[in-house]
Image (cartoon, rainbow, N blue to C red):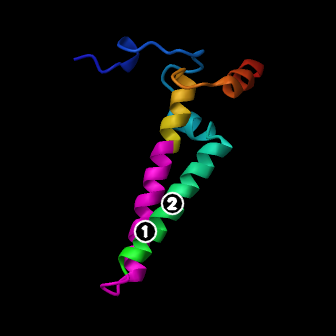
Amino acid sequence: MNTDITASVKPEYPVIDRNPPFTKTVANFSTLDYVRLSTVTAVSVTVGYLSGIKPNIRGPSMVTGGLIGIMGGFMYAYQNSAGRLMGFFPNDAEVARYKRA
């Protein structure tokens, strides 16, 4: 079974790293990635707090919502960063940065 996504879908933008490691992908997070991560986390904390009002478990519910939000936000930011490095998303800033190096 072929699990290589690039075998079925060709990148539309310049490829910087076909298989970026975890550290390179996280180091490539843009400001927008951090904004998205923070927004998803903040919304999840708020939803967790509000959903815990009726049974009077606001604290634990808020912490659980925050943990879910930060994990989801991180995965979303990671997906966008890796997609830019692999050439699946627009990556003009990354191309300029890695051409210099």
The residue shown at (52%, 22%) is: 86
The residue shown at (47%, 68%) is: 45
Q: Which residue is mark 2?
A: 41
Q: Please tell me how crowded label 1 is: few (under 14), some (14-19), or many (20+) other residues with Cα within 10 Å.
A: some
- For the stretch drawn in magenta, the main secondary structure is helix
Q: Which quarter of the rendered picture does the N terminus lie within? A: top left
Residue projecting furthest to the left: 1
The residue shown at (30%, 21%) is: 3
- Looking at the rendering, the stretch of residues picked out in magenta corresponds to 53-76
Q: Please tell me how crowded label 2 is: few (under 14), some (14-19), or many (20+) other residues with Cα within 10 Å.
A: many
Q: Which residue is mark 1?
A: 47
Question: 2 or 52, which is in the foreground?
Answer: 52
The residue shown at (35%, 18%) is: 4
Q: Position of residue 94 (x, y in %)?
A: 67, 26
> In this picture, is 26 found above or below 12?
below
Give the amino acid type for the residue marked by disc 2 in the picture.
Answer: Thr
